Amino acid sequence: MQHFQCYIDGEFADGEARFESIDPATGAAWAEMPEAREADVNRAVEAAHRALYAGLWSKLTATQRGKLLYKLADLVAENAQKLAELETRDTGKIIRETSAQIAYVVEYYRYYAGIADKIEGSYLPIDKPDMDVWLRREPIGVVAMVVPWNSQLFLSAVKIGPALAAGCTMVVKASEDGPAPLLEFARLIYEAGFPAGVVNIITGFGPACGAALSRHPKVDHIAFTGGPETARHVVRNSAENLASTSLELGGKSPFIVFADADLESAANAQVAGIFAATGQSCVAGSRLLVETSVKDRFLDILKAKAEAVRIGSPLDMATEVGPLATRRQRDHIEALVGRSLADGARLVTGGRAAEGAGYYYQPTILDCDGSASPSLEEEFFGPVLSVVSFETEAEALATANNTRYGLAAGLFTRDLTRAHRLMKGIRAGIVWVNTYRAVSPIAPFGGFGLSGHGREGGMAAALDFTRTKTVWLRTSDEPIADPFVMR
Ligand code: NAD
């Protein structure tokens, strides 16, 4: 069995305990992971705190920080294949996607490398003639980063990149469900030459590790990605240290298809939106809203595509849908599909766990017209599409917004004015028009409502890892006048 370690204060170390990591394609243990508990968390946060205030890191210029980030990007590029294979092995995400995604993660690090020395303060046109007043942008402090199992290298890059650019130090908690890629990534942090304590990478379970980290008194900000229920715990924990939070949570994103759309292209986007990454994507377009007049035709195209999907070993380049990451995840999907069918949803295709070892589930389509299916409200985080039809644009918009989530939306139409109207009306952080599941380091990403708050990606994300300091400098040599009057 392979053996992984935590990375704390510039050293690789075993955790207070150990646990086995399961290969989701076989259901068998394949690696031993370090389990960090409170004492490890404390060591990691203390190291980050020292690095922020007393170490070499605080003396580097922003340009030097940027150079270290460029070095890290190059190392990720050189080690891309290994990182992709580890992510696939430990989480079941297909190699086709992990290898493409890691290549793009390099671009995120490069983007934030370039941003490091472009974070500027400002000079204020103050209303007092004898004062110079300006704002400095300083790092927000020690950041706790907590990520889920899916796309860990990506979901951590959108936090680590801007936080390093801003000059922060951090403790990253990899998910207990597949931490191998992030623990391996720690070797690149070391090799790139970041001073000890700047980036610490640990893994462990929610209550013993995640909770200890998010309520630690020396944590200033928590950047969390995961489900809304866990986010509530994190926010409650932050009542202890009063850390600020950014929350990237789940979704029940509408995918709206009008009769005038290019149906073949929309169907391909819908397949990308719900079956790619085996549906374990926060932006999954999991609610298909289709105009009644083309519903049957569109479902026929989709059904054929769903049934042609190649299910297999995630390490095989030809595989299109691999296993779910955990047995818990497959059980949740089976139960929710069962409840939806009991509540009147009609099975168009799929609906069963695949035979044999591993946590496979068939690409599934549920026609929910005429039913109050829970599948229209609850997140599967799996390859299950719920379909409803609509007659009018107003009905499409009302149904799209009939959710407590608000992460993403897809809109398929050739009518430009309608696209503009709907784009404004949809309550979601991302709207894709005639495309789906596109991301870029340059474009912010994040949600409304139960999908969380804060944005990742873009310049704004780097600014979110800073806080301002207002500096007042009196330019007069005259003695200070009446000390009992505020200046
Ligand atoms: P999760 O919420 O169960 O776990 C996420 C992380 O939180 C894990 O590292 C876990 O150990 C940790 N955690 C658990 N309990 C904790 C506690 N009490 N205090 C602090 N940390 C704790 O999420 P998951 O099931 O691993 O992932 C799936 C969820 O993540 C889905 O809802 C999905 O939509 C969401 N997600 C969102 C995005 C986004 O960017 N918006 C991206 C990917 C996934």
Image: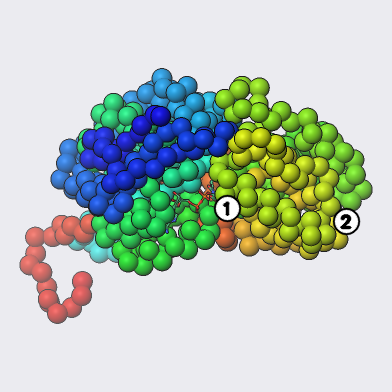
Q: Residue at x 28, y 39 (%)?
A: 14
Q: Say whether residue 405 is visible.
A: yes
Residue 477: where, in percent of width, then height?
Answer: 9, 60
30 sits left or right of 358 in the view: left
Disc 1 secondary structure class: loop
From what the image shows, is residue 20 above or below residue 256? Answer: above
Viewer-nearest residue: 289 or 271:
271
Mark 1 neighbour density, 10 Å: few (under 14) some (14–19) many (20 or more): many
Q: Residue at x 69, y 55 (%)?
A: 336
The residue at which mark 2 appears reads as 391
Q: Quadrant of the C terminus?
A: bottom left
Indicate which label's residue lies in the foreground, 2 or 1.
1
Viewer-nearest residue: 186 or 337:
337
Residue 264: where, in percent of width, then height?
Answer: 82, 33
Q: Quadrant of residue 60?
A: top left
Q: Quadrant of residue 68?
A: top left
Q: Is mark 1 within 8 Å of ligand 1?
A: yes
Q: Is mark 2 within 8 Å of ligand 1?
A: no
Residue 285: give its label. none
Tags 2 and 1 in contact by the CB under 8 Å rule?
no
Specify which label sits upstream in the sequence, 2 or 1.
1
Disc 2 secondary structure class: loop
Residue 198: where, in percent of width, then height?
Answer: 26, 40
Q: Residue at x 53, y 59 (%)?
A: 228
Amino acid type, label 2:
Glu
Residue 275: where, in percent of width, then height?
Answer: 69, 38
Mark 2 neighbour density, 10 Å: few (under 14) some (14–19) many (20 or more): few
Q: CA distance from mark 2 to mark 1?
A: 28 Å
Amino acid type, label 1:
Gly
The residue at which mark 1 appears reads as 250
Q: Quadrant of the N terminus?
A: top left
127 sits left or right of 366 in the view: left
